[in-house]
Image: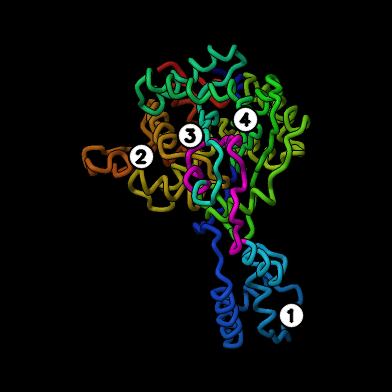
Amino acid sequence: MSDTERPSVSNTAAPSPYQRTWFNGRLNLEQQKKRARELLRAYHQDQAPAVQRFQQHHPRYDHGFYPQLADAQWVIARENGFASWARMKTHIEQLAHQPDTAPDGRHTLHLRCGEDIRQSLQLAGFIGDFQQFADPFCQGPLADLPLPEFIHNRARFIASAYELEPADALARLQGEYAVLQRLEDYQQVVLWFEHDSYDQLILAFLLDQLLRLQPKVQLELICVEQVPGVPDFIGLGQLTPELLTWLWHNQRVPLGRAHLQLGRQVWRALCQPDPAALQALAAAETPPILPMQRALQRHLRELPSSFNGLGLTQHLALQAMADYGADTVGRVFAVLMRQLEPLPFLGDLMFWHLLRQLQQSREPLFVLEPGKGDPGRGWPSYPIFLTETGVAVLRGKRDFRELFYGERWVGGICIKGQVR
């Protein structure tokens, strides 16, 4: 492929490292009061971290500032994502008083791109049906095809990429896609999604299908980018059952024609063999689904960069090995997800597929040692380290497009390597 034919976006500036914390959102008011007292004490002892927290979060901070307990409580509330201590207190009290009746009904369908909240919904008292729809459109080919042919193409990719039996992959997909024909069995269909590209691309597909099918059913959306009390919100699966109930009452909106039309626009652009339409959508805000814009921007960064020919996830995987001491596949994945990835979306099998694609290089970027791993743990335990070629590509001294001999898809865009 010539330089003029290569889809490319610049991602020379990797995101700044950030250590995420995993928190389920279950705040305890007494614990927060204790944290406020400890913060105030540390401030009056002139401890630098406490002073920095006041500087960052208190609007009236100056060098002559002498905070009281209410000021420390304000800082704690702001750190937890609330406008004030009173609002945080109200939120905690709401979560503590869950209704005795089911939030939904027997004729409700909860549609989600994974199994991660199924049990939590049950624990929260939801009684409707739950259906997973989890075709990972952020990897593999997308094309504007009749649905049966599209499903077969996706099943072939999933079986190959994630090392599954072809018949099993096809049967699973057919079972999930079949839900589209059963929507009118329900009175209410609620889509549960978060802000990353894995979720948002699936959401775009479902919205496009809903516009096509026009089911006579109440359609609603819960689309979450931030959650009060969860500064490092990654996904719905990390939340407590009572927070899912809170989202149901506070974040659920009717799906209107504007939602469906946006889904159609995005889905059609995703399936194009050229990134221009998707880039245009990603350059503008995407009301009424604001997280869609950021997800599309992140998806486009999987195209080869002009810096070294790597997609962003590929680049970050090599960076985890070179700069963060990650020396097994599992540790590389952990560093990627907890520190480097700006919008976490990958599952473990998706990451393993990405590494195996990076192995399709005329000169190896890294050495993988399966024989030295733990047989009981499998590939996450395999030792891995960069080669000189891998370092050169990471630093922009070599272009991976000149080394790659495989085939990689970013939506409808096929990235073909050189002839081996």
Q: Residues within 10 Å of mark 4 (few under 14, many from 20)?
A: some
Element on which disc 4 rests:
loop
Amino acid tagged 4: Tyr
Q: Is residue 228 left or right of residue 330?
A: right
Residue extent of the magenta highlight: 95-121
- The verdict on residue 106 being magenta is yes
Q: Residues within 10 Å of mark 3 (few under 14, many from 20)?
A: some
Q: Is residue 15 above or below residue 115?
A: below
Element on which disc 1 rests:
loop
Instruction: Examine the rendering and report whether any part of residue 12 can be seen.
Output: yes
Q: Residue at x 69, y 29 (%)?
A: 217
- The verdict on residue 335 being magenta is no
Q: Are marks 2 and 4 in contact (CB under 8 Å)?
A: no
Disc on the earlier residue, 2 or 4: 4
Q: Is residue 43 left or right of residue 416?
A: right
Which of labels 1 and 3 is toward the front?
1
For the residue pair 10 and 84, the one nearer the viewer reads as 84
Q: CA distance from mark 4 to mark 1?
A: 58 Å
Disc on the earlier residue, 3 or 2: 2
Q: To which quarter of the image does residue 287 belong?
A: top right
Residue identified by numbered label 1: 62
Q: To which quarter of the image does residue 197 belong?
A: top right
For the residue pair 50 and 261, the one nearer the viewer reads as 261
Q: CA distance from mark 2 to mark 4?
A: 56 Å
Q: Are marks 4 and 1 in contact (CB under 8 Å)?
A: no
Residue identified by numbered label 2: 387
Q: Residue at x 40, y 46 (%)?
A: 332
Residue identified by numbered label 4: 186
Q: Is residue 287 left or right of residue 392?
A: right
User: Residue 71, percent across and down?
Assistant: 69, 79
Element on which disc 3 rests:
loop
Residue identified by numbered label 3: 398
